[in-house]
Image: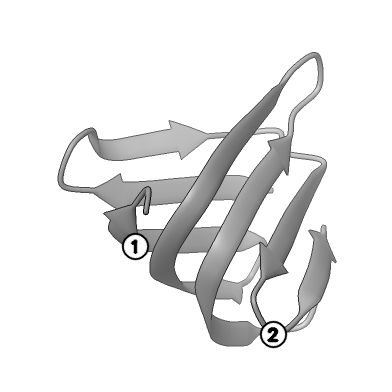
Amino acid sequence: MIVKIYSLTKGLETFSMVKAIRIKSSKYNLLIMKDYLPIIGEIDGNFELELDNDSKVLDNIKGYYVNQNNVFELIIKETGR
């Protein structure tokens, strides 16, 4: 999977070869893997990428995401609290 993260502080970050995406929002928990159905939603919580040899965690974010055709895009509206 390819993940694109857009934010005002870091601009565009792109990650390839992502194994899984974990979203722990205030209202739900979600695990997204390759070939997951198209989905759009809002995050108010934590976001984690599982890469081949590493992981990236974003805590306490607010934003919006869309997943389709194995490309996940996240627009971060606000970080921290």
Q: Earlier in the sequence, mark 1 or mark 2?
A: 2
- How far apart marks 1 and 2 lie (CA) works out to 19 Å
Q: Is residue 81 left or right of residue 43?
A: left
Residue 75 is labelled as 1
Instruction: Report helix, strand or loop for mark 2.
Output: loop
Mark 2 surroundings within 10 Å by alpha-carbon count, few (fewer than 14), some (14 through 19), many (20 or more): few
Residue depicted at 74% across the width and 52% down the height? 21
The scheme the figure's colours follow is one colour
The residue nearer to you, when weighing 28 against 2, is 28
Outermost residue, left side: 8
Q: Is residue 25 left or right of residue 4?
A: right
The residue nearer to you, when weighing 75 against 57, is 57
Q: Amino acid at mark 2?
A: Lys
The residue pinned by badge 2 equals 27
- Measured from the top left, where is residue 4 in percent x and y? 44, 48
- Measured from the top left, where is residue 18 in percent x and y? 72, 38
Q: In the rendered image of this protein, does residue 72 appear above or below residue 42? A: above
The residue nearer to you, when weighing 54 against 68, is 54
Q: Amino acid at mark 1?
A: Ile
